[in-house]
Image (cartoon, helix red, strand yellow):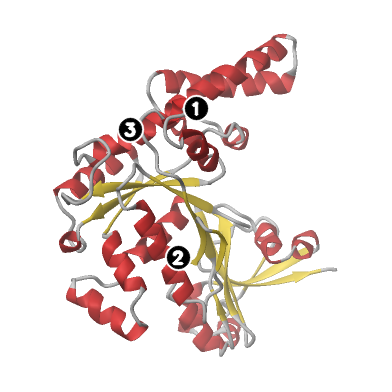
């Protein structure tokens, strides 16, 4: 199960520096964490989770395997991308393939790095990116809705439903609002997602600040935080230059360097976790002598779906899930202690997996 966050932004905002730091961090973790570079602009990184080490210590696991998320470095966008300016068509094609958008915004001043529009205005930059995506979505929908409307008028039920969803999106886009603002019933969410609209995807802002502002942010990043709060979007403030330096340091030097800057952990850890949360994902664990492993499911997933993440046969033949809450597993010293204390539960097909559940699945082959 792959989940992709596309890193977007105008030229010279630090987007590629950030992506390079991500991939260098992942490569440095390769001894313990699986990592692969699928293409030059795609990196698969481990999601930092301190719970793994604690579980593995109790289970005396030989190996630790974290869950992962993929970041895609998408070609820099310029004003007019929706009309094919710059690498517009490539940019738009790549962003359609990701599950969420990470919008990197320049929140630093540097006379040696030219801003493509000649000013430092992260909120304006965010609006430029959003506008280009909305224009592209609008153009796509206006072309696609015509044959759908004809079929709908002809009585085709599926086309009627699709026409209604397209109309909802078009109404928003024509008002200058992203498609993600649509009010949908639970039944409409998946077919609406399948419309493939870029502005329907969840969005995270990354305020890329100068080195001196990495801990507390600055006047530019505060504006981004306010915008994110108004929109209900995610926001992370980091310094891409610091992250690039941190990624190249030995583990023992890293904490000392971060501490000198007033930072508790690399900003990339927060970015990776934020990307994971942005996609509406949670983690469950399996733990034993061979390995402790983190697995990814979407919020609201039921026990058989979680079993299917491990192996499709587990979902097909699902019987029960032996389930221990993370806190109980830690407090009671593992599986045996939880069982003795009555904290191991046998959950059925309707059980909704909770973040941190430690699970063992029973199934028929």
- Is the residue 32 above or below the residue 40 in the image? below
Which class describes the residues within 10 Å of circle 1: few (<14), some (14-19), or many (20+)?
many
Q: CA distance from mark 2 to mark 3?
A: 27 Å
Q: CA distance from mark 1 to mark 2?
A: 31 Å
Of the two numbered discs 2 and 3 on the same chain, state the one appearing first in sequence. Answer: 2
Earlier-in-chain disc, 1 versus 2? 2
Q: How many marks?
A: 3
Q: Is residue 228 visible?
A: yes
Q: Which mark is residue 137?
A: 1
In contact (CB < 8 Å): disc 2 and disc 3: no
Q: Nearer the viewer, residue 184 or 259?
A: 259
Secondary element at image label 2: helix
Residue marked by disc 3? 128
Asked if 108 appears above or below 49 in the picture, the reply is: above
Residue 167 image-quadrant placement = top right
The CA distance from mark 3 to mark 1 is 14 Å
In this view of the protein, can residue 168 be seen by the observer? no
Q: Residue at x 59, y 88 (%)?
A: 62
Q: Which of pointers 3 and 1 lies earlier in the amino acid sequence? A: 3
- Residue that badge 2 annotates: 23
**With 335 as the anchor, is 87 left or right in this view?**
left
Q: Is residue 97 left or right of residue 274?
A: right
What secondary structure is found at the residue carrying circle 3? Answer: helix
What is the x, y in percent for residue 177? 39, 26
């Amino acid at each position: 199960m792959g989940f992709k966050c596309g890193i977007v932004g105008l030229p010279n905002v630090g987007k590629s520096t950030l992506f390079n730091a991500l991939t260098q961090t992942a490569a440095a973790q390769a001894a313990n964490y699986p990592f692969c570079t699928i293409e030059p602009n795609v990196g698969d990184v481990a999601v930092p989770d301190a719970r793994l080490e604690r579980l593995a210590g109790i289970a005396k696991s030989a190996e630790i395997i974290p869950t992962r998320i993929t970041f895609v470095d998408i070609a820099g966008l310029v004003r007019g991308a929706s009309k094919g300016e710059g690498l517009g068509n490539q940019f738009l094609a790549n962003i359609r393939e990701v599950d969420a958008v990470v919008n990197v915004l320049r929140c630093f001043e540097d006379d040696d790095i030219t801003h493509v529009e000649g000013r430092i205005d992260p909120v304006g930059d965010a609006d430029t990116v959003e506008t280009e995506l909305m224009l592209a979505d609008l153009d796509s929908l206006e072309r696609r809705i015509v044959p759908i409307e004809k079929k709908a008028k002809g009585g085709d039920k599926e086309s009627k439903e699709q026409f209604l969803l397209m109309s909802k999106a078009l109404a928003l886009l024509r008002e200058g609002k992203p498609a993600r603002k649509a009010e949908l019933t639970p039944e409409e969410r998946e077919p609406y997602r399948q419309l493939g609209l870029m502005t329907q995807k969840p969005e995270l802002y990354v305020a890329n600040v100068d080195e001196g502002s990495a801990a507390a942010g600055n006047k530019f990043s505060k504006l981004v935080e306010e915008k994110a709060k108004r929109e209900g979007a995610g926001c992370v403030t980091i310094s891409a230059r610091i992250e690039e330096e941190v990624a190249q340091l030995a583990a023992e030097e890293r904490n000392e360097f971060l501490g000198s800057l007033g930072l508790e952990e690399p900003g990339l850890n927060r970015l990776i976790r934020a990307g994971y949360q942005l996609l509406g994902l949670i983690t469950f664990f399996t733990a034993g002598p061979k390995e402790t492993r983190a697995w990814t499911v979407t919020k609201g997933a039921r026990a058989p779906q979680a079993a299917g993440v491990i192996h499709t046969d587990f979902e097909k033949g699902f019987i029960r899930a032996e389930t221990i809450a993370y806190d109980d597993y830690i407090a009671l010293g593992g599986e045996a202690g939880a069982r003795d204390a009555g904290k191991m539960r046998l959950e059925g097909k309707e059980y909704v997996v909770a973040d941190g559940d430690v699970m063992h699945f029973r199934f028929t082959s």
